[in-house]
Amino acid sequence: MRARVDGDFEDMDIQRLADTAAAEIEAHCGLALLGQVVTVTLQAWCKRIPLAIGPFWPEGLADHPVTVELLDEAGNITPHPAGWWITPGRYPVLNLTASVHGAALRIRYPAGYGTRTDSIPPDLQLAIADHAAMLYDARGFDDEMPQGLSMAAARIAARHRRVAI
């Protein structure tokens, strides 16, 4: 990392850059770094539904249980009448035991590594710090600095991205 910081008068700006770097890593990887509730609404689905944001956060279930609901054309909401279960992990999957029809299916589930920043894997913490340092050093430059993630952050993030065919 290469951020050249003198003093603490820019701490709030640096925190904003770190938050921005974390958000960019989340978007790039399809991750929830810190615990949060993800809501997905689908108009078409099958019995096996890969969930876009991971990892599944089992510790969050006490406060944020998984809900699977059907929405009809009028916007009425009913719990999904058939059984279902979640395959947890980095790439969670909702598995429905039966096909049920409706206008939409809404799924809410907890995702993230935990509630504290030290619950984020160390390599992703480094990616956030390196990318924040690049953003800090790029202040005031318009066209001279490369766009996108820092090279180190991109390499680290590549290990956490979902690959699909």
Image (spheres, rainbow, N blue to C red):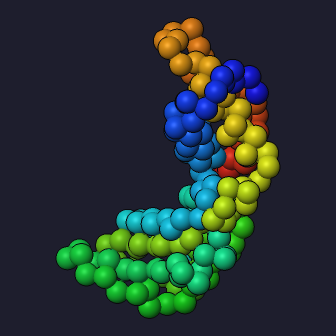
Q: Is 34 on the left-hand or right-hand side of 74?
A: right
Name the residue rendered at 55%, 30% in the picture. 10
Residue 96 spot, x, y in % from top left: 56, 81
Quadrant of the rendered image containing residue 150:
top right
Quadrant of the rendered image containing residue 61:
bottom right
Q: Nearer the viewer, residue 46 or 4?
A: 4
Residue 91 in sight: no
Quadrant of the rendered image containing residue 43:
bottom left
Name the residue rendered at 61%, 32% in the picture. 8
Q: Residue furthest top?
A: 144
Residue 23 in sight: yes
Residue 24 spot, x, y in % from top left: 56, 40
Where 122 sits versus 90, above or below? above
Where 103 sits versus 84, above or below? above
Name the residue rendered at 59%, 65% in the picture. 35
Residue 104 spot, x, y in % from top left: 36, 71
Quadrant that contains the N terminus: top right
